[in-house]
Image (cartoon, rainbow, N blue to C red):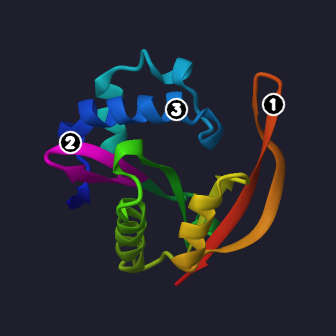
Amino acid sequence: MEIRQLTAEDATLYKALRLEALRNHPEAFGSDYEAEKDRSVERYATRLESEQSMTFGAFHENKLVGVVTIVNLEPVKMKHRANLFAMYVTPHARKQQIGRRLVQEALQRLKQHPVIEQVHLSVVRTNEAAKALYRSLGFESYAIEPRALKIDDTYHDEELMWYRF
């Protein structure tokens, strides 16, 4: 298993996995499949090259099986914070510590950042496996955002968590 930061050359693989995630777990992401399915590979490549974010990928036999993105916040009063987004591991690769390794890599990279002091994330309240993973890595819950997402006529609450270096 190799974990590394994705680059523009990984955009096609990233787009495929991102669309799988949005299709399989719409409640876990702010975006949706319909909004992203027609986006160009170049747009994903640009995202992967952004100076404000880093996306890490887990590869098994040269196939992208998991991703996580960290975003540094721009406003001067929020530069001490980063957000963890878009965590996903494909179903056939779960229960192999891939999610743990991805988040650990993201935290390790952020820990080296001279300004970042804390990391925030949100997770759908019913995703017990993800919440357990984040807690085991030192994240703490601090709030529930009720009805954070609405898919058709169903609302999904999100649990807000943070990690302090």
Q: Position of residue 26 (x, y in %)?
A: 60, 33
Q: For the view shown, which residue lies furthest in the left direction?
A: 61
Residues at marks 2 and 1, CA–CA distance in whole angstroms: 34 Å
Alpha-carbon neighbours of circle 2 within 10 Å: few (<14), some, or many (≥20)? few
- Identify whether 70 is placed above or below 17: below
- Identify whether 161 is placed above or below 4: below
Helix, strand, or loop for circle 1? strand
Alpha-carbon neighbours of circle 1 within 10 Å: few (<14), some, or many (≥20)? few
Which residue lies at the image location 52% right of the left edge and 24% below the top edge? 33
The disc labelled 3 sits on which kind of residue?
Answer: Asn
Which residue lies at the image location 71% right of the left edge and 62% below the top edge? 160
Region of the chain picked out in magenta, as a range: 49-68
Q: Position of residue 24 (x, y in %)?
A: 52, 32
What mark, if any, has residue 154 been given in the picture?
1
Which residue lies at the image location 26% right of the left edge and 34% below the top edge? 13
In primary-sequence order, the first of circles 2 and 3 is 3
Residue 90 shows up from this direction: no
Q: Position of residue 108 (x, y in %)?
A: 36, 76
Q: Are marks 1 and 3 in contact (CB under 8 Å)?
A: no
The disc labelled 1 sits on which kind of residue?
Answer: Thr
Residue beneath label 3, please? 24
What kind of secondary structure does the magenta stretch mostly adopt? strand
The disc labelled 2 sits on which kind of residue?
Answer: Lys
In primary-sequence order, the first of circles 2 and 1 is 2
Residue 94 shows up from this direction: yes
Quadrant housing the N terminus: bottom left
- Identify whether 59 is placed above or below 149: below
Q: For the view shown, which residue lies furthest in the bottom direction?
A: 165
Helix, strand, or loop for circle 2? strand
Which residue lies at the image location 41% right of the left edge and 72% below the top edge? 110
Residue beneath label 2, please? 63
